[in-house]
Image: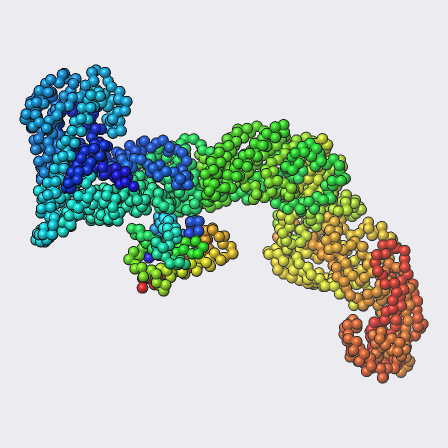
Amino acid sequence: MDPVKTPLGKMLLEEITPVVMVLRTPLVEESCLKNSLSFIEMLSPFCDFNNIDVPVRTSSDQPYRLQKFKLRLFYESDIKQPNIMVAKERLKQVITEAGEKDRSDLSTDPPDISNVLESFKSEISPSWFEIFNKELVRTVSFSEHEAFDHPVACVSVVSSKDEQPINKFVDLFNTNKLPSLLNDGAMDPKILKHYVLVHDNKDGPSEKATKILTEMKNTFGFNGCHLLCINSSQDEQIEHQDNPWAPYNFDSSPSQNLGRYLNIDDFNEIKDLIQELSSKHIIPYMEQKVRVLNQQVSATRKGFRNQIKNLWWRKGKEDTPDSSNGSMYTYSSVESQIRVLGDYAFMLGDYELALSNYRLVSTDYKIDKAWKCYAGVQEMMGLTYFMLDQSRKEAEYCMENAFNTYLKLGSSGRQNATRCGLWWIEMLKTKDQFKEAASVYFRICSEELLHSAVMLEQASYCYLLSQPPMLHKYGFHLILSGDRYKKCDQIKHAIRTYRNAVSVYKGTPWSYIKDHVHFHIGQCYGFLGMYDVGVTHMLEVLDCSHQSKATQELFLRDFLQIVQKAGKSFEVLRLQLPVINISSLKIDFEDHRTYASPGSTSVKESVWCSLEEEMIPSLPNARTNWLELQSKLLPKYKESNICVAGEAIKIAIEFKNPLEIPISISSVSLICELSATSDETNSGDHNFNVDTDVSCSTSGIGNNEEHKNLSIILTTANLVFLAHCREIISDTSSFSLSEVNISLGGGEAYLVQLTVTPKVEGILNIVGVRWNLSGSVVGFYSFGTNYGKKKIAKGRRKAKQSPGNCLKFMVIKSLPKLEGFIRALPEKAYAGHLQHLVLELRNQSEFSVKNLKMKTSHPRFLNIGKQEDLDLEFPACLEKKTNVSPPANPKIASNGVFLFPEDLSVQGENLLLWPLWFRAAVPGNISLQVVIYYEMGDLSSGMRYRTLRMHYNLQVLPSLDVSFKISPYPSRLQEFLVHMDIVNKTDSESIQVNQLSTIGSHWEISLLQPIDAIFPSQSLIAGQAFSCFFVLKSCRKSSSTGESTSSLFPHIGSNVSLVPDGSKGAPFDTSNSPLADFHECERLQHGISNQVGNNRMTIKCGVCFLYSAVSVKPYNFVLITLFNQSCNTASTSPISWVVDAPRTRHHDFSTSFCEINFRMTIYNSSNARASIVIKTLDSTSVSDQLRDETSGNQVGWHAMSLAKDIKLESDALRNHVRKSLLPESVSAFIWSGSSSTRVQLKPLSTTEIPLQICVFSPGLYDLSNYVLNWNLQPVDDHENVGERIQSSGTSLGYPCYLTVLPSD
Amino acid sequence: MIVCVAVVGHQNNPLYIQSFTEADDALKLHHIVHCSLDVVDERVNNPKKSGLTLNETFLGLLYPTENYKVYGYLTNTKVKFILVTTDLDVRDADVRNLRYGIAKFFRRFHAAYVDAVSNPFHVPGKRITSRTFAERVSNIVKSFGLSSAG
């Protein structure tokens, strides 16, 4: 690339050009100002020659042609180093102006980073940087150590109106006015002089001027004088087609007025003047000077001899004090001359000559330690290398060297370093070394904020342009720059940089940085008053839970401030504060299933279904059930949920505050849409569109490639949704919404309950939720986007529902709805607690309901009473009444469903009260469900029936713990000993046991000892245990009265009072309604059939404890314990018997043998008639016959097992005993009387058989050598068909020992 | 003194950033870490230029700022470890010393990271929230501070 065509080359050709000093009189300026131009301004468009085509011959003999040439004109007063403060002001002005112009696209969305990368290089960085950089370069012009700013020529301008113009020309050269450069010897005061006489044609004809010109030519010589006539246009103003001043942009007036009195003749005259000045005077003068200087330099410095001499001479100067400001070199010094030579050669385009001279002088300066001059020469060397396009490395090395040398000078070199840096950067940019350029930008940042802001911003664009783009650094430098801009109140620049930074960080998880950028950009917009845009940026920082508490407060405060300043309420989709936990969304609605309390919905649907199973008419049976009716009415919506007009749909959703500071949220409500049935299709489609748009746009976020398109979709979808929401919100006539205000503390989450109540029939669609943050920002959240995760509270039809439908409801005509609750149901109770409760049902609507049914999940806990129980006084009603009427059979169907009487009406103000009995059956946490089914009185309605579901949670604490052990009462038939341990398991209650009752007619209970003896304290304190013994006696009579009696009075048992008489009223009747019912439930629970006529000797008995806590008087407790212990008596056969023989007998054997009479009692426990044969055996025959079966016929003294159950003994032992006894076995007694007795025994009856033995000697006798053969005669009782009954058998006698002692 | 350590995922997403200063300079350190990613990318894309040998995970000094030096380490799964330190006058030989240098620090840090992401409950690509990891890293940082000081 031709270095001249590069930006740096162009810049150098404009900036390093000969300077012409202009001296003028005030009248000249006056004439020019008629055109709104100063004299220099008037000339400057014509000073730039792109094709001057002048032959130039410098040092070499071969001339070359100069094409591009430019003169820089300055008034004498401007030729000086600019004041630093003024320069700063000027720079600031440039920046501010650039900011003003930049207003155009501030409010648009920040560009996407991929777009930025694709755009052209020139578009990336703002164009005003060029202007700024130029201004920055100019701050260091006219320095002493650089000759290219030293005026080459001087033009004196005098007006023809001036008096004594010749004298004026002389006066203009008065040295007082001349710049210091000329006066203090930095440059040669003998410069080329040129004299121009300006004539204003408006002032009259030019004769006088030509006269003066001749006079001038006589005085100053022929060549150096010139006449310039301006303002030739007569009266009319000229509109120039392409105004030559327009691109120069002087800040005074609009460009079309510029040069309004100058016509084409004037133009040509000016052009000619400058052309002549350049080509005939300045260029030849410079050529001349270059040649002269070159000769001088060659004479003194070139060649080996001169170099040695120079070195020698320099060494001698080494001791001179180091002065770095360059003033040690006057124009006459060799060094200055070489520098001038170099600069002139550079300006004339002879770069080779320039370079050789720069090289020469740079070593001199270095040896002299004249660092500023050295740096300046190095800088020029770098530029010359660049213009020669020879050695890049050399060029860069020189620039870096110059830059560092300037920096070393400290503050005085600072600005020079900046200029050098800028040139260096341009050089690097030309070679596409953007990264290096960026680092140079970074190095020229000074402490001054505004300056460094511009530099950092330029650096950032360099990072962006580097290959590959360094986006992270780009963003970082933009932010650094933005911060500085903001501190300098250059808000628009700050916004631009921040906005660019946003595009870098968008979509990345660097939240700290993102927050910082969005917060500041939001603040900036706030300063500018563009609150809308500011708010959108501030919204991004709201979810700043990762920030410290102070930062969170700051963010929220500033956000609210901006919102307040905006003075309107914002509506924001997906407001990030608070966070909405969509997975917590829970919808409660009531179709045919209605709920008594909010807690009811938490119970699983399957639980309810199993309860309702028997009550709800099943599909095939009821042809006209509501489902079919519905599908006929609205076939399209059979899958959507049903709700009833006038009944609220409850939505629970969790709001979470992610911040550590409290926030207040008001007016939380649902966004709903209810379309009448007629236009359902339209609205449905509309919704669908919105839903799909929103969902697709959100799903794609984070996907970088599609980011651009998606963001557009997102915004449009947002707009559509917002508009949609507004439209919906305005239309609230057809339904009513609830509003909730909450205040969330730091990190708090709150489950908000919202309701919507449709008023008319149609399709209700719940679109989302809206809320108001701190009273100023309205947030929207659409449920539609996250269907996938949501949970439906009642998912009976979940499987077949398409996800979108769970927020869509079909609203049907309003229906009667029962509301019900159980009055005073305790939440916590001790086990056994018995209470009388009332169920209250209410129907708000005008329509009646019928066919009420009820079922409870735990009949052990909750029993449905009879209507007449309603007014009973409790607990008095439990007491035994004298006139016991047979209880009416309650209308409980086989599966436990209770049918209310047909004639009940629940309507309007009519309450239905129904008694319930509550008893805490077992300890633990119980979830109690009650379902009430009812049918609509009006058959035309959408539903035929509804169910009311009630749910209660109970905690039942343990009270009394009873354990028991039953053993047969020895030697008594049908009586048992019960050993019972009672422990008070309560925490603090004392318990008094009042009464103990058996349930049922089969058993009688009695105390073994009087109550005072075993239980003197009468009450059990917490943790205390006591045990007592009871006798349980079977009192089953022969069933001659028939089965009917027992079923009529199934629960009449016996009572034992455990308190001293008189302290308590009448004992409670356990056979009456509530207690008996609960007993029934207990039986069912334990799987015991009501049928007691079991042949086995199993004791199945309910025992009822009635007790009360001492401290809690009003409560009464009933503990029903079922004995279900198989008691292993001697025989498992249906026939049992007891030998009732005396234990000892004294007899005087000297007189006679002893006759002993005793009885055998036989009991037939079966329901069949039994015939029994008792065979008494002689001992000898027994031992042979029944060796294996008899339990022994031992006589005499021997060790005896105390175990009652001989069968438990091992056979080996028994055989051993028998064998050892056999040798001396002489039958010591004989059975007298018949050896075989036959009796017939009715079912459940006893008989006694007298027996007699004769004993001949004293001893111990075992009366077990008999055999009982029994045979049951089959009865045609169909109830026992299922049971396997042993129909016959043989039982051996069991040991019964008789001791016969001789009497004295 | 080590000022900050960071783990950055292969999509340049921050996985773990922990500063060890009392000052509230989270934003600054985030910026430093974020910027250093450019240098890491550059090193990885031009391994010859930056003088990295093949399979070398330790990237060395990424860039010096006025007050800090930033070192980098790249695992074979393109997870970057960044270390920001205030020790400005460290010789390169000391840095690369595997017994006590920063390279050693990165080895240990890498091991801790591997253990943390081996946790079955860690979601790859998400921030590392393991408390054990945080403790271990701070121990490594502390022990490094001791060894380098001594």
Q: Say whether residue A929 is visible.
A: no
Res A1131 → quadrant: bottom right
Apparent side of residue A411 relative to residue A603 in the rendered image (left or right):
left
Q: Residue at x 8, y 33 (%)?
A: A176
Q: Residue at x 33, y 52 (%)?
A: B63
Position of A963 relative to A97 (above/below): below
Position of A517 relative to B69 (above/below): above
Nearer to me, B75 or A579: B75
Nearer to me, A134 or A1271: A134
Res A122 → quadrant: top left
Q: Residue furthest bottom?
A: A1223
Q: Position of residue B76 (x, y in %)?
A: 44, 56
Position of A1002 relative to A1211 (above/below): above
Apparent side of residue A1118 relative to residue A1171 in the rendered image (left or right):
left
What is the quadrant of the N terminus of chain B in the image? bottom left
Q: Position of residue A266 (x, y in %)?
A: 19, 22
What is the quadrant of the C terminus of chain B in the image? bottom left
